[in-house]
Image: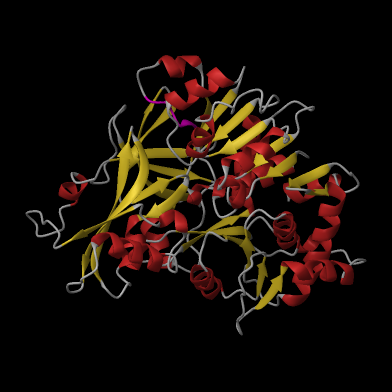
Amino acid sequence: MWLLNQLKGYSTFDNTAIIYRDNNISYRDLWERSEQLACFINNEAKTNNPIVIYGNKEIDITVVMIACLKAGKAYVPVDTIFPKERLLRITDMTETELVFNFSDTDIVSDDFKTVNATWLATICSKYRNRVISSDNWVKPEDNCYILFTSGSTGLPKGVQIKRKNIENFVSWFQEYCKIDGDDHVVLNQISYSFDVSVISLYVYLAMGKTLFNIDKAMLEDIRILFSYLRKSEISVWISTPTFLEICSFDASFNADMLPKLKKVILAGEVLTKNLVNTLNGKFNRLEIINGYGPTEGTVLLTACRITQSMLDDKKDLPIGYLLPNSVYRLVDDNGEEVKDGGTGELIVVSDSISEGYYKNPEQTHQSFFKTKSGQMGYKTGDMAFVQDKLFYYVGRFDFQIKLNGFRIELGDISNNLNKINFVSNSVVLPVIRNGRINSLTAFVTLNGRTEASNIKIGIKIKQELKNLIPSYMIPKKIVILDQFPLNSNGKIDRKKLMENI
């Protein structure tokens, strides 16, 4: 595997691989600790079921990920923004034997063994003189990782990404990631549960660069965040447009704070010209890469460098050129291919496309297909058009949206809202401002009457949701209705609801 071979080449180096708060790890220690943990995993996990990792941005999470790859096991990163109930759903669905727990939450079950972060030093000491054979490393047809995304049934869907998928992506996208030898620090802020984080691990760590980790506690206080950024010396910034936009609102976020910043890689949301122009006003000679891709397509399927001609064009910014050795179709509501220049649902066939959802053949069949040549195809649900080989994003085909870089099935939120005992029915809709999804609003009807005010009911609903779904999926606004408006078909009139947002 390219990543592991690269890391093996750096295994005698004391260069810093990862910085996290006041801690760091060298490439030498990263290799040795992952060897020891790989031996432990190989000894403890008797099946090929994936290994679950529950945490945020701790250094040893990356060590465990690499150890899993060495042991030939897929890993499942679950961020602590997910409540315990969501984690346990995932452990049930994967039938995992091992959960590495980096959180303060007690994770105990008869179905798997929990390895707490405080035990890792003892484990590494026990396996100090052990190495794992490269024969155990993940094979091209093996899963490297499984990312669980929001599912319309209320249960998360596990997107399985094989080694051949990730290596196809890296062989293409690494050209966009090149930086000068003296520039070596890369922002590692994106949650490991979000596929764009893969760029840091599989591209930049494989290049021998230094990852600068930012955790969720830093993100909650911009003063703390900026204090770390000032001493980071980062030259590459990877994030969603929204996160970068929030930072750019502060006047102090400029070249004085990040004097070495030269490259920005943005994905997960619509990139606006306003943000690009703001960045160009704050930084000199900044290279901005815009990318697009569903998790099912292994991080990104299209990418491009933003040029002045793109900014001058009347159209919105493009999402890029399709990766090589891939084909696409744009189809209308009837599945018919649209004419040149027309807008339709984007369908992509590529070696980067996943083989489907983990142990979920029904939903896999709905979204994936295999060509006669054996390549996988995926119906993205995204509307797009193509001009001069550049792809332009138009919007979602269904009720699946992206908010702050996280993909969310609105039906997932509704299904969980409806689990609350005093909720009768619900509809969740996106709030769109300036062409971008800003937040979510939930419209709710109740079971019977209550003396509590609508404000108190809304607060109670949000409290209940915290135990059911990740915080980023909780609607900002709860609207209590006596009844839903209906359209001519007797269905809930979503357009009417949108008028009230």
Image coordinates of residue 331 in percent, x first then y, are 30, 41
Which of 45/242 is in front? 242
Asked where in the image residue 367 lies, by quadrant, the reply is bottom left
Q: Is residue 147 left or right of residue 487?
A: right
Image coordinates of residue 71 in percent, x first then y, are 74, 64
The type of colouring in the image is: secondary structure
**Picture residue at 79% right of the left edge, 28% below the top:** 181
Query: Is 355 one of the magenta-colored residues?
Result: no
Q: In this view, which residue lies farthest toward the bottom?
A: 110
491 to 293, vertically: above or below: below
Locate the C terminus and report the quarter of the image it occupies: top left
Give the residues drawn in magenta, as a range: 316-323
Which of 263/102 is in front? 102
Image coordinates of residue 281 in percent, x first then y, are 54, 18
**Picture residue at 34% right of the left edge, 65% below the top:** 461
363 to 106, vertically: above or below: above
Q: In this view, which residue lies farthest toward the left?
A: 488
For the question of whether residue 368 can be seen, the reply is: no
Q: Is residue 270 left or right of residue 447?
A: right
> Principal SS element in the magenta part?
loop
Image coordinates of residue 266 in percent, x first then y, are 53, 35
Query: Is 321 one of the magenta-colored residues?
Result: yes
For the question of whether residue 106 can be seen, the reply is: yes
